[in-house]
Image (tube, grey):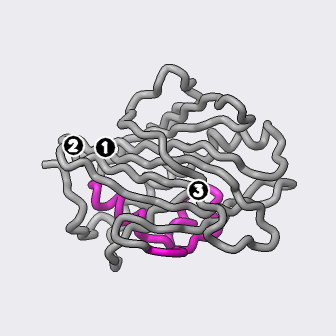
Amino acid sequence: MKHTKRFSLFLAIGWLVAGSWAEAPADFALDKDKNGIKVYTRKIEGSSLKEFKGVTSIKTSLTSLVALMDDTDALTKWLHNCSAAKLVQSMNYYERITYTVINAPWPVSDRDTVSYSKIVQDPKSKVITIYLKGMADKYPKQSGKVRVPAMKDFWQFIPSKSGYVTVIYQLHSDPGGSIPDAIANSTATDIPYHTLLNMHKIIKQEKYQTAKIPQVKELQ
């Protein structure tokens, strides 16, 4: 796979909650623990939609994970309910704006999201954090889609000398429009669980395992 001087750092609806959290903070409750994936949720004051946090461990490299994030065309194959993804703007190696469409269960209208993303790597620990922030007005509104007006999300890859990388996916959003609470909050478990389960499978592909990205530094 060809890598340009930028990461296809995506969204599924997000911005950042900083921190290297392999364990859930006290205010999160464990909702699902299956297939090596833990999903935590918590209520957010003033919002009917819960915030989620998915945690898993994958035997792979940091480079392979970044290569997967850089593969915009593959996003629909593993990000749960993502039916379309498009790079809107690449500012530089670290920053970009991405557009995605997220399928919603009937009778709810599909949502689309526009997010600014930035990647940083800690020079000592080699932890990679991908911060995402909603920028709803950076891409024209699309017919038949409800634009997600606000979101906060991050991805984090925490390497270890055992060869495993802890992957954290945390997100909260305002889905926009009207969504029954039961449907909205069911996605708080389904999205991180199925996304991380799909990641376990797709990351094994040779193009990710053999990817070369000089800017990504592995833990020695």
In the image, is residue 147 above or below residue 57? below
Q: Amino acid at mark 1?
A: Ile
Residue at (71, 39) in percent of width and height = 186
Judge from the rendering whether residue 157 lies leftward or rightward of residue 42; answer left or right.
left
Q: Quadrant of the N terminus?
A: bottom left
Q: Which residue is mark 1?
A: 158
Alpha carbon separation for disc pair 2 and 1: 8 Å
Question: Considering depth in this image, is 6 or 101 the residue closer to the camera?
Answer: 6
Q: Amino acid at mark 2?
A: Ser
Q: Which residue is mark 2?
A: 125
Q: Do the CB atoms of the residues marked 2 and 1 lie less than 8 Å apart?
A: yes
Question: Considering depth in this image, is 95 or 189 the residue closer to the camera?
Answer: 95
In the image, is residue 117 above or below residue 96? above
Badge 2 element: loop
Q: Amino acid at mark 3?
A: Gly
In the image, is residue 84 above or below residue 53? below
Q: Do the CB atoms of the residues marked 3 and 2 lie less than 8 Å apart?
A: no
Q: Mark 2 or 1, which is nearer the eye?
A: 2
